[in-house]
Image (tube, rainbow, N blue to C red):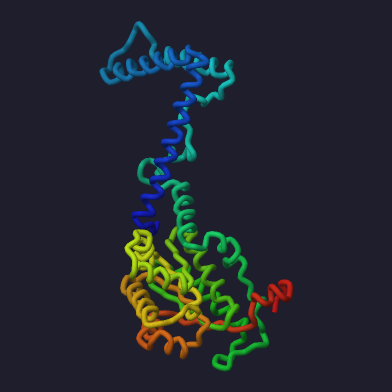
Amino acid sequence: MALTNPQYDQIMRMYNERQLRHQRELQEHIRIAYTKVPRLSEIDSEIASLSVRKAKAMLCGENAPDLDLKAAISDRAEERAALLSVNGFPPDYLELSYDCPLCRDTGYINGTEKCSCFRKAAISLLYHQSNLEQVLQVENFDHFSLEYYSDDLKSQATSLTSRETAAAALAKSRAFVRNFGRSFENLFFYGDTGVGKTFLSHCIARELIEQSYCVIYFTAFDLFDLFARYTFSNSEEAKDAHSNIFDCDLLIIDDLGTELTNSFVSSQLFLCINERILRKKSTIISTNLPLDRFADTYSERTFSRISSNYTIIKLFGNDIRIQKKLLGGTKA
């Protein structure tokens, strides 16, 4: 499970909070029950005392001919259950409860195997930290449709139709997910507005988060705003976010080219791309810029890194957002 130390610590703090909450609940139940039925307190003390005697006898290999400890404990347990029932308490009212009975709110089964609830907690945390928690409920492979791409529009460069091009991009996206963790890959989506670049990025993000990989999404504007805050401020939040950009399993930079580009932006983009390549951390970039304008905007050096280390995927076709909004969802 690809969790950073801070992420792991955050999940374990959640388990500690659960345990403390249930301990407080139990103490309150004990107070209420003992106040209403004082005999319950006496029974619990007797059971505890008998249990200690039984443990000592077993350790010493002794028999207690004057007292059947097991039977005595059983008798008091039956009396305890009867008193709880008569006084309107549930049978487990004086027992510690758990959010997850399998691991008893420790996150681990038998002390070593991660519980299924740990994986759910990790995925929930990763969704929250990805900046994509809501959108991925809609934008995923299950909702990606090739019907929005035309069979009539053709690329002069490849002679492929818009739909054939999108199908190839979809296949590459699925292969990216399938091979993730086994091989180091990066994707570069480019093309006109509304042809599915961001949607495919979201599809990939959803699949990888479900596999407990750390995925972080930024629009280009937000990414460079974060770089600026890190460079010109000393806030711990900016430092942590900056560190996560280089350490996360997958970084998605969306709408590159829509931000105000200057020498700072160009240098920070190169730093980000180059550092993640050196660390073998995957990145997905999407842009509306054609390749020649991209190179002019961000420097030949940056484009050289991308062309050498990224799979470049072009999408084209009618704007899907316009199809959905103006045509009432009618597909091309």
Q: Quadrant of residue 43?
A: top left
Locate residue 207 relative to residue 249 in the image: left or right. right
In percent of width and height, residue 112 lies at 36, 45
Quarter of the image for residue 166 reads: bottom right
Residue 18 lies, with reference to residue 193, above or below; the image says above
Q: Where is residue 181 in the image (x, y as percent from the top left)?
A: 40, 66
Q: In front here: 238 or 165? A: 238
User: Which residue reaches farthest bottom?
Assistant: 156
Q: Tell me which residue sits at (47%, 15%) in the image.
A: 40
Quadrant showing the N terminus? bottom left
Viewer-nearest residue: 221 or 31: 221
Hey, which quadrant is residue 69 in on the image? top left
Q: Residue furthest top?
A: 66
* Front residue of 109 and 291: 291
Q: Which quarter of the image is occupied by the C terminus?
A: bottom right
Q: Can residue 71 be seen in this view?
A: no
Could you tell whether 222 is left or right of 66 in the image? right
**Residue drawn where x is 47% and y is 78% of the image:** 259
Return the residue nearer the eye: 108 or 242.
Answer: 242
Q: In this view, does 97 lie above or below 186?
A: above
Q: Is residue 318 visible?
A: yes
Q: Which residue is drawn at 40% across and 68% down?
A: 226
- Residue drawn 48% across the image and 61% down it: 209
Q: Could you say where residue 9 lies in the image, as x and y percent from the top left? A: 36, 50
